[in-house]
Image (cartoon, rainbow, N blue to C red):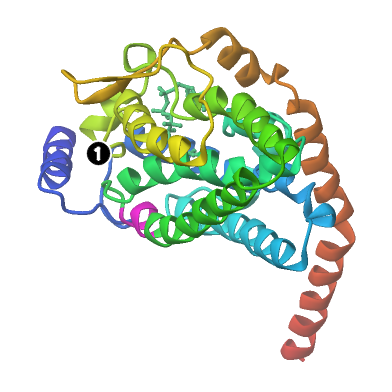
């Protein structure tokens, strides 16, 4: 019976029929989705921190409005993805508790600081650019609720990527100091952005199974290459240098070759020892604790009204 169910499930996946919450699915498929979707949602939420840090220092009202809207979008993305993950039978409360308890992962990239105003542009251009590359592929995956969340998220991410690039374009036409700030920012964010795609395919424990289930439609290395190929011409247009001496067009492959990623740094950040891991966790926990009175008040209000309705 189990084998029959599994075969039928895999047939649906192979035929590109979306799996919906009420459909039978293997436990491991459900578990993998909850793992990936909760990490994804947490990344959106933690990702608000490096940028939130710059809201009070945005150089104009226009920039402030754009940044505020973008950060709110990221919070919203977290909520869509938590909701999509809840359809798999896990509660948002449990997922968030796992993050507070330090048991849940989120993307390595958000453990790097936003040190200058140029970083706000670079995060939009490179970090959101990398995120879209990945998320467009995810939107074509097998689990209906996750894919549908991705469609809207990609549209919003596209605005985020453009606002970042437009900000950098202004800096690229500015003073020598502004140009230097832009170059320094890209120097710091280039490699961590490439790490967002995860380990090389050969070192990625989940990839083969996730590709078979079409949770992932493209591999980590495929997506990384796609991102690099799309980004190099944009860097040239900005008049900046990407910090990789091995980066060059390979006519034969029809792709850019690039240098080796520092996987030691990647492992270090994932283990909790990146530049801002502790700060991010502490800010997340503090926000939860500061919100205690709001949750208590909402619960008291709900209980009062429930009691009145019962009278
Ligand atoms: N940061 C933190 N952890 C990572 C990263 C990264 N950049 N890349 C891989 N990992 C983790 C995986 O989560 C996995 O950990 P686990 O086994 O403890 O769960 C482990 O490293 C092994 O990696 P893979 O086998 O390659 O894992 P997976 O198949 O899940 O692929 C990937 C990783 C590509 C990140 C995938 O999970 C994914 O597409 N996630 C959804 C997108 C996402 O989370 N984006 C977040 C940044 S975008 C944004 O928020 C704006």
Instruction: Give the residues in magenta.
Output: 144-148
Q: Residue at x 78, y 49 (%)?
A: 54
Task: Give above or below for 195 relative to 95.
Answer: above
Is 46 situated left or right of 145 in this image? Answer: right
Q: Position of residue 33 (x, y in %)?
A: 40, 40
Q: In the image, is the residue at mark 1 within 8 Å of ligand 1 by its beta carbon? A: no
**Residue 146 part of the magenta-drawn span:** yes
Is 20 situated left or right of 57 in this image? Answer: left
Quadrant showing the C terminus: bottom right
Query: Disc 1 marks which residue?
Result: 214
Q: Residues within 10 Å of mark 1 (few under 14, many from 20)?
A: many
Q: Position of residue 190 (x, y in %)?
A: 54, 27
Quarter location, residue 298? bottom right
Residue 105 visible to the viewer: no
Q: Residue at x 56, y 56 (%)?
A: 163
Quarter location, residue 189? top right
Characterize the magenta stretch by its predominant secondary structure.
helix
**In the rendered picture of this protein, how many numbered marks are placed on residues?**
1
Task: Give above or below for 265 relative to 129.
Answer: above
What kind of element bears circle 1? loop
**Residue 245 part of the magenta-drawn span:** no
Q: Residue at x 45, y 24 (%)?
A: 198
Name the residue nearer the viewer: 229 or 265. 229
Q: Position of residue 165 (x, y in %)?
A: 53, 49
Quadrant showing the N terminus: top left
Q: Position of residue 150 (x, y in %)?
A: 40, 54
Name the residue nearer the viewer: 100 or 189. 189
Quarter location, residue 294? bottom right
Name the residue nearer the viewer: 306 or 17. 17
Residue 167 visible to the viewer: yes
């Amino acid at each position: 019976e189990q084998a029959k169910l599994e075969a039928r499930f895999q047939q649906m996946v192979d035929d590109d029929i979306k799996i919906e919450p009420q459909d039978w699915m293997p436990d491991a498929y459900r578990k993998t989705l909850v793992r990936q979707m909760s990490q994804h949602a947490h990344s959106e939420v933690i990702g608000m921190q490096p940028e939130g840090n710059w809201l009070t220092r945005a150089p104009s009202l226009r920039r402030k409005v754009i940044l505020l809207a973008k950060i709110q979008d990221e919070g919203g993305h977290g909520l869509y993805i938590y909701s999509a993950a809840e359809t798999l039978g896990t509660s948002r409360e449990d997922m968030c508790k796992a993050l507070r308890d330090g048991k849940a992962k989120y993307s390595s990239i958000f453990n790097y600081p936003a040190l200058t105003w140029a970083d706000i542009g670079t995060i939009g251009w490179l970090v959101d650019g990398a995120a879209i590359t990945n998320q467009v592929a995810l939107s074509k995956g097998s689990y209906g609720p996750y894919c549908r969340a991705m469609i809207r998220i990609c549209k919003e991410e596209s605005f985020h990527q453009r606002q970042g690039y437009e900000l950098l374009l202004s800096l690229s036409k500015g003073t020598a100091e502004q140009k230097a700030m832009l170059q320094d920012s890209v120097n710091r964010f280039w490699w961590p952005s490439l790490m967002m795609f995860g380990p090389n395919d050969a070192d990625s424990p989940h990839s083969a199974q996730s590709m078979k289930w079409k949770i992932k439609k493209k591999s980590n290395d495929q997506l990384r290459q796609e991102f690099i190929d799309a980004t190099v011409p944009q860097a040239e247009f900005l008049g900046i240098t990407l910090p990789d001496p091995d980066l060059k067009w390979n006519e034969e492959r029809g792709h850019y070759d690039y240098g080796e990623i520092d996987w030691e740094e990647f492992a270090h950040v994932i283990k909790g020892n990146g530049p801002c891991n502790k700060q991010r966790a502490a800010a997340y926990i503090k926000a939860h604790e500061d919100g205690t009175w709001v949750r208590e008040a909402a619960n008291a209000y709900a209980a009062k009204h429930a009691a009145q309705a019962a009278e």
